[in-house]
Amino acid sequence: LSIFFCMQGRDYARIKNSATNTIIAMRRALSLGLDPSSVNSKKRCIRGLENHSSDSITRKRLLERAAGRRVVLKEQSAQRTSGVNDPLAIASVSILNSRLAKERAALNGERDAEDASHIQEGAIEFSSMTRCETSPDV
Protein backbone atom coordinates (compact mmCIF):
# COMPACT_ATOMS: atom_id res chain seq x y z
CA LEU A 1 0.00 0.00 0.00
CA SER A 2 1.52 3.30 -1.07
CA ILE A 3 0.38 6.65 0.16
CA PHE A 4 1.09 9.66 -2.01
CA PHE A 5 1.09 13.17 -0.69
CA CYS A 6 -0.13 15.68 -3.20
CA MET A 7 0.37 19.36 -2.61
CA GLN A 8 -1.46 22.06 -4.48
CA GLY A 9 0.64 24.86 -5.96
CA ARG A 10 -0.93 27.39 -3.61
CA ASP A 11 -0.09 25.18 -0.60
CA TYR A 12 3.54 25.00 -1.66
CA ALA A 13 3.61 28.77 -2.23
CA ARG A 14 2.12 29.39 1.21
CA ILE A 15 4.69 27.11 2.89
CA LYS A 16 7.55 28.70 0.95
CA ASN A 17 6.29 32.20 1.81
CA SER A 18 6.02 31.28 5.49
CA ALA A 19 9.57 29.87 5.52
CA THR A 20 10.86 33.00 3.78
CA ASN A 21 9.15 35.26 6.32
CA THR A 22 10.60 33.23 9.18
CA ILE A 23 14.10 33.45 7.68
CA ILE A 24 13.70 37.23 7.32
CA ALA A 25 12.59 37.48 10.96
CA MET A 26 15.57 35.34 12.07
CA ARG A 27 18.02 37.55 10.15
CA ARG A 28 16.38 40.67 11.58
CA ALA A 29 16.78 39.25 15.09
CA LEU A 30 20.46 38.50 14.40
CA SER A 31 21.03 42.03 13.10
CA LEU A 32 19.62 43.34 16.40
CA GLY A 33 22.00 41.11 18.36
CA LEU A 34 19.25 38.67 19.38
CA ASP A 35 19.22 34.90 19.22
CA PRO A 36 17.45 33.79 16.01
CA SER A 37 15.35 31.37 18.08
CA SER A 38 13.68 34.43 19.64
CA VAL A 39 11.34 34.49 16.62
CA ASN A 40 9.78 31.15 17.65
CA SER A 41 6.08 31.55 18.37
CA LYS A 42 2.78 29.81 17.74
CA LYS A 43 2.91 31.14 14.16
CA ARG A 44 6.63 30.70 13.53
CA CYS A 45 8.99 27.80 14.09
CA ILE A 46 12.64 27.95 13.09
CA ARG A 47 13.09 24.16 13.20
CA GLY A 48 14.81 23.20 9.97
CA LEU A 49 15.48 26.81 9.00
CA GLU A 50 18.41 27.34 11.38
CA ASN A 51 20.85 26.96 8.51
CA HIS A 52 19.36 29.99 6.79
CA SER A 53 19.78 32.47 9.65
CA SER A 54 22.71 34.08 7.85
CA ASP A 55 24.34 33.86 4.43
CA SER A 56 27.60 32.61 5.96
CA ILE A 57 25.85 29.73 7.76
CA THR A 58 23.97 28.85 4.57
CA ARG A 59 27.23 28.81 2.58
CA LYS A 60 28.94 26.72 5.27
CA ARG A 61 26.17 24.07 5.20
CA LEU A 62 26.23 23.98 1.39
CA LEU A 63 30.00 23.48 1.46
CA GLU A 64 29.64 20.69 4.04
CA ARG A 65 27.10 18.90 1.83
CA ALA A 66 29.28 19.32 -1.26
CA ALA A 67 32.29 17.94 0.64
CA GLY A 68 30.20 14.92 1.66
CA ARG A 69 29.20 14.25 -1.91
CA ARG A 70 32.81 14.63 -3.07
CA VAL A 71 34.18 12.02 -0.63
CA VAL A 72 31.46 9.56 -1.63
CA LEU A 73 32.09 10.13 -5.34
CA LYS A 74 35.85 9.82 -4.79
CA GLU A 75 35.36 6.49 -3.00
CA GLN A 76 33.03 5.25 -5.75
CA SER A 77 35.57 6.26 -8.39
CA ALA A 78 38.40 4.53 -6.54
CA GLN A 79 36.32 1.36 -6.27
CA ARG A 80 35.45 1.40 -9.98
CA THR A 81 39.11 1.90 -10.89
CA SER A 82 40.20 -1.03 -8.73
CA GLY A 83 37.26 -3.23 -9.74
CA VAL A 84 35.90 -3.36 -6.19
CA ASN A 85 32.26 -3.02 -5.15
CA ASP A 86 32.09 -2.26 -1.44
CA PRO A 87 28.90 -0.38 -0.45
CA LEU A 88 29.95 -0.48 3.22
CA ALA A 89 33.12 1.47 2.45
CA ILE A 90 31.05 4.08 0.62
CA ALA A 91 28.64 4.30 3.55
CA SER A 92 31.55 4.55 5.95
CA VAL A 93 33.14 7.57 4.23
CA SER A 94 29.73 9.23 4.14
CA ILE A 95 29.17 8.54 7.84
CA LEU A 96 32.59 9.89 8.81
CA ASN A 97 32.02 13.02 6.76
CA SER A 98 28.55 13.71 8.22
CA ARG A 99 29.75 13.79 11.83
CA LEU A 100 28.97 17.51 12.30
CA ALA A 101 25.42 17.11 11.02
CA LYS A 102 24.88 14.20 13.42
CA GLU A 103 26.22 16.20 16.33
CA ARG A 104 23.83 19.06 15.48
CA ALA A 105 20.94 16.59 15.20
CA ALA A 106 21.84 15.03 18.57
CA LEU A 107 21.92 18.46 20.21
CA ASN A 108 18.52 19.33 18.69
CA GLY A 109 17.16 15.99 19.92
CA GLU A 110 18.42 16.67 23.45
CA ARG A 111 16.79 20.11 23.44
CA ASP A 112 13.53 18.64 22.15
CA ALA A 113 13.61 15.97 24.87
CA GLU A 114 14.13 18.65 27.53
CA ASP A 115 11.24 20.69 26.13
CA ALA A 116 9.00 17.62 26.07
CA SER A 117 9.95 16.78 29.64
CA HIS A 118 9.06 20.31 30.82
CA ILE A 119 5.73 20.12 29.00
CA GLN A 120 4.99 16.75 30.58
CA GLU A 121 5.89 18.08 34.04
CA GLY A 122 3.57 21.03 33.48
CA ALA A 123 0.73 18.74 32.40
CA ILE A 124 1.21 16.54 35.48
CA GLU A 125 1.29 19.57 37.77
CA PHE A 126 -1.83 21.01 36.12
CA SER A 127 -3.69 17.70 36.41
CA SER A 128 -2.83 17.42 40.10
CA MET A 129 -4.01 20.99 40.73
CA THR A 130 -7.28 20.35 38.91
CA ARG A 131 -7.57 16.76 40.13
CA CYS A 132 -7.82 15.51 36.56
CA GLU A 133 -6.81 11.95 35.77
CA THR A 134 -4.08 11.68 33.14
CA SER A 135 -2.54 8.72 31.44
CA PRO A 136 1.18 8.04 32.05
CA ASP A 137 2.06 9.07 28.49
CA VAL A 138 0.72 12.63 28.81
Image (cartoon, rainbow, N blue to C red):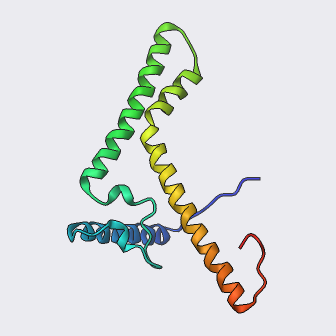
Left of 92 or right of it: where is 53? Answer: left
Q: Quadrant of residue 25?
A: bottom left
In percent of the image, x 40 and y 72: which residue is there?
A: 18
Q: Is 32 situated above or below 66?
A: below
Q: Residue at x 49, y 13 (%)?
A: 80
Q: Does residue 128 lie above or below 108 as drawn?
A: below
Residue 117: % across, % down:
60, 68
The C terminus lies in quadrant: bottom right
* Front in this rendered view, residue 112 or 19: 112
Observer-nearest residue: 123 or 3?
Answer: 123
x and y percent of residue 12 in the render?
Answer: 47, 66
Q: Is residue 45 left or right of residue 25?
A: right
Left or right relative to 56: residue 67: right
Q: Where 105 sits versus 66, above or below? A: below
Direction from residue 88 to residue 131 in the image, left or right? right
Which residue is at the far top?
82
